[in-house]
Image (cartoon, rainbow, N blue to C red):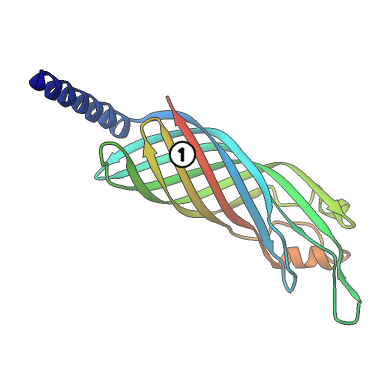
Amino acid sequence: MKKLIIAAVAAALAFSVNVSAQHYNNARFGVVGGLTSSTGKVKDLDTKSISQYHAGITLEIPMGAGFAIQPELLYQVKGMSLDKWSDATGKEISEAFETKVGYVELPVQIQWGPDLVAFRPYAFVEPFVGYKISDKAKGNEAKTVNGELEKVEYGLGAGAGIDISHFQISAKYFWNFGNIYRGDISQTGTTIKNLKDGNNFNGFAISLAIFF
């Protein structure tokens, strides 16, 4: 009986190793979604982050020696918010303002991490590019912003994750490069002028992927 139990445990371990090896050594397709929190760095003003979401599809492609490439196609919502702000004399410097922008985004993770059989921890860098398909702004300058944000966004993320069987959990910080406002700022208020000067929609994201 003892030998039978040992043989059963050994067989279960061998099966687990084989399944895990198949998971982490073959390309696999899945769905992904999670939380996105972003904000803006507006010149001389304090901004607040906006918590939104992302969802889409993903493909993990092992490359050997611990490396993998994981492109994703996402619907990604980013934005920023700031309160009305006045100087020490009470003079209003900036109006209350909020904007949310939806992008079709293509991030490509370049991963490295050891296959530890039962799981695979990894670190990654992630260039991305996105195309705006929706925007919504609230505040006195909303009409100025709507329709005048840049169509294309691009940037870089960095983070870490872990593969556990059919599941993957990851977290990253991302930086958007360039300005988000493309309109004429000559007749705009302080908020829009500052948006033009700032680096916007930087933040972090937490994702859960399920592979099939």
**How many numbered marks appear?**
1
Above or below, 177 against 207 in this view is: below
Q: Nearer the viewer, residue 8 or 201?
A: 8
Q: Is residue 150 left or right of residue 6?
A: right
The N terminus - image quarter: top left
**Mark 1 sits on what residue?**
71
At 25% from the left and 31% from the top, the residue drawn is 21
Above or below, 34 against 157 in this view is: above
Q: Which quadrant holds residue 47?
A: bottom right
Q: Is residue 166 visible?
A: yes
Q: Is residue 143 left or right of residue 151?
A: right
Measured from the top left, where is residue 11 in percent x and y? 17, 22
At 75% from the left and 70% from the top, the residue drawn is 45
Amino acid carrying mark 1 in the image: Pro
At 74% from the left and 48% from the top, the residue drawn is 100
Q: Is residue 89 left or right of residue 79?
A: right
Question: What secondary structure is found at the residue carrying circle 1?
Answer: strand
